[in-house]
Image (tube, rainbow, N blue to C red):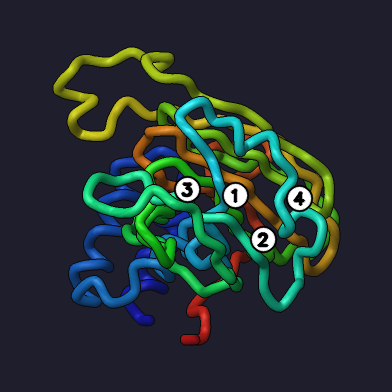
């Protein structure tokens, strides 16, 4: 905690080598035990509630479907069809019973590996993630959304759609070597209106063959720095 307080001014900055170095130093000091809270200190969403998978395919047809979490966000559980898409197993579909589960990002850059949160193996799938953002007053901020190829994301803030886009295969260019490192990546900036108090953020995300990660950061409306007066969830209680 004391190290975090000392380095917090660096963590507030936007794209900055100092911020990245400070975050990595804190990760090393904590023996990588508090990656999500270090991410949250930079304004990244560090903790999520996640539910999935819902059906998708290599054409991404599942992303346009309205699955139960969009209609009944707080239901105790959801029924979902599951299709085995790997060799050596049965191709028959079966039904899953899904519930919201706690998840944290896997690095100080605020990225959550969505596939790793799924209760069954997936190749093409849709999932939902939600969290809350607290604001000390009404304000406009920006949401920086990390995107990769063959991934779709739809984002709601307080019931309003603020982003809805798909990145196709080869859309971002890059060399074969970069693609082997899960690059290239793209950051999409969208403006969001926050009310005083708690604000609900929900994401619908899909993979149709891409490396399935979600990463978001709340930034100042115009400055390249963490939004002041805005906090994101830290230290989710364990299930």
The residue identified by callout 4 is 157
Write down the quadrant of residue 229 in the picture: bottom right
- Dots 1 and 2: beta carbons under 8 Å? yes
- Residue drawn at x 27%, y 68% as measured from the top left: 26
- Residue drawn at x 14%, y 22% as measured from the top left: 177
- Residue drawn at x 78%, y 68% as measured from the top left: 198
- Nearest to viewer (mark 4 / mark 1): 4
- Dots 3 and 2: beta carbons under 8 Å? no
Q: Earlier in the sequence, mark 3 or mark 2?
A: 3
Image height check: is 179 above or below 105? above
- Disc 4 to disc 1, how far (Cα)? 12 Å
The residue nearer to you, when weighing 99 against 108, is: 99
Whether residue 210 is visible here, answered yes or no, is yes
Question: Under tag 3, what secondary structure?
Answer: strand
- Disc 3 to disc 2, how far (Cα)? 20 Å
- Disc 4 to disc 2, how far (Cα)? 14 Å
The residue identified by callout 1 is 218
The residue identified by callout 3 is 214
Image height check: is 144 above or below 235? above
The residue identified by callout 2 is 230
Q: Residues within 10 Å of mark 3 (few under 14, many from 20)?
A: many
Q: Earlier in the sequence, mark 4 or mark 2?
A: 4
The residue nearer to you, when weighing 74 against 191, is: 74
Q: Earlier in the sequence, mark 3 or mark 4?
A: 4
- Residue drawn at x 57%, y 52% as measured from the top left: 54
- Disc 3 to disc 4, how far (Cα)? 16 Å
Q: Earlier in the sequence, mark 4 or mark 1?
A: 4
Q: Residues within 10 Å of mark 4 (few under 14, many from 20)?
A: many
């Amino acid at each position: 905690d004391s190290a975090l307080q000392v380095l917090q001014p660096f963590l507030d900055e936007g794209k900055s080598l100092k911020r990245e170095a400070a975050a990595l130093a804190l990760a090393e000091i904590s023996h990588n035990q508090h990656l999500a809270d270090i991410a949250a200190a930079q304004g990244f969403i560090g903790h999520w509630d996640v539910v999935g998978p819902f059906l998708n395919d290599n054409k991404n047809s599942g992303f346009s479907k309205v699955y139960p979490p969009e209609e009944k966000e707080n239901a105790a559980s959801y029924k979902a069809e599951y299709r085995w898409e790997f060799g050596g197993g049965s191709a028959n579909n079966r039904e899953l019973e899904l519930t919201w589960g706690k998840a944290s990002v896997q690095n100080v850059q605020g990225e959550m590996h969505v596939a790793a949160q799924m209760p069954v193996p997936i190749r093409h799938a849709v999932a939902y993630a939600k969290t809350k953002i607290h604001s000390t007053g009404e304000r406009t901020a920006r949401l920086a959304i990390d995107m990769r190829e063959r991934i779709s994301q739809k984002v709601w803030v307080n019931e309003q759609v603020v982003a809805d886009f798909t990145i196709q295969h080869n859309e971002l260019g890059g060399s074969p070597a970069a693609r082997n490192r899960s690059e290239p990546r793209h950051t999409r900036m969208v403006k969001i209106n926050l009310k005083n108090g708690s604000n609900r953020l929900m994401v619908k995300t899909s993979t149709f063959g891409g490396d399935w990660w979600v990463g978001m950061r709340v930034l100042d409306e115009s400055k390249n720095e963490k939004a002041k007066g805005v906090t994101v969830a830290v230290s989710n209680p364990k299930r």
